[in-house]
Image: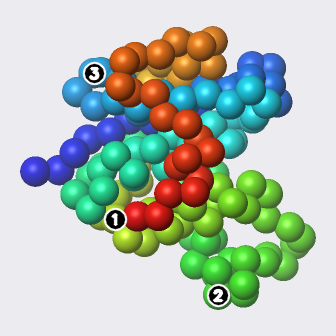
Amino acid sequence: MTKILWTDGSASPNPGPGGFAVIENGEPIRLGREKNSSNIRMEGAALIAAMEYAGEENCEIYTDSQFWKNVLEVWARGWEDRNWTKRSGEIKNLEMVKTAWRFYKKGKAEIKWVRGHVGTEMNELADKWANKAREGAEVEGKSVALEKLLRKEK
C-alpha cells in the first residue's frame, strides 16, 4: 500500500520563525519548527520529515515547493557528482539538501507538486499545521527536531 503524505513549510516573516508539517489521512504526523528560518528551509524540512517517516515504504509526497521537487529530481544528482558544487556558486542550505537527497535515494518516495493556496484540501491543511508549528503548537508524539533529522542516517 502506498502512503500518501502532504507537506508544507512556513516562515513569517520570511526569513523569521519557521514551522513545517507532514499530514497523513487528514492528521498531522510530523511537526517541527526552527527559530530563525525561511520558507525554503521549512519546505525542505517537511519533505525530509516525510521521507524519514515513510522509510522504505512506497509513498507519494505532495508539496507546493517546485524548488524542492527540482532539488530532488533534477539538480542534486549533478551537484553530488561535482562534489556538492554548482556552476553558479554555492548551494544554499547544503546540509539540508544532502540530507534530503540521502533520504530520497534510499527511499521509495514519488514527489508530486501541487499549486499552493488554491483550495486543495490537504495542501491547505498542511499549510495550517505548518503555521501552527511555527507558532509553537505541538501534537504529542508528533514533534520532531530538525537538527536530529539533519543528522539522522537512514
Which quarter of the figure is the C terminus placed in?
A: bottom left
The residue type indicated by label 1 comes to Gly
Q: Is 83 above or below relative to 71?
A: below
Residue farthest to the right, as pictured: 89
Query: Label 1, label 2: how many angstroms apart (C-alpha)?
Result: 20 Å
Query: Label 1, label 3: how many angstroms apart (C-alpha)?
Result: 23 Å
Query: Label 3, label 2: how many angstroms apart (C-alpha)?
Result: 38 Å
Classed neighbour count for the residue bearing mark 1: other residues with Cα under 10 Å, few (<14), some (14–19), many (≥20):
some
Q: Mark 3 touching mark 2, by CB under 8 A? A: no
The residue type indicated by label 2 comes to Asp
* Element on which disc 2 rests: helix
Q: Earlier in the sequence, mark 3 or mark 2?
A: 3
From the viewer's perspective, tell me whether residue 9 is left or right of residue 52: right
Residue bearing the label numbered 1: 107
Q: Earlier in the sequence, mark 1 or mark 2?
A: 2
* Element on which disc 1 rests: loop
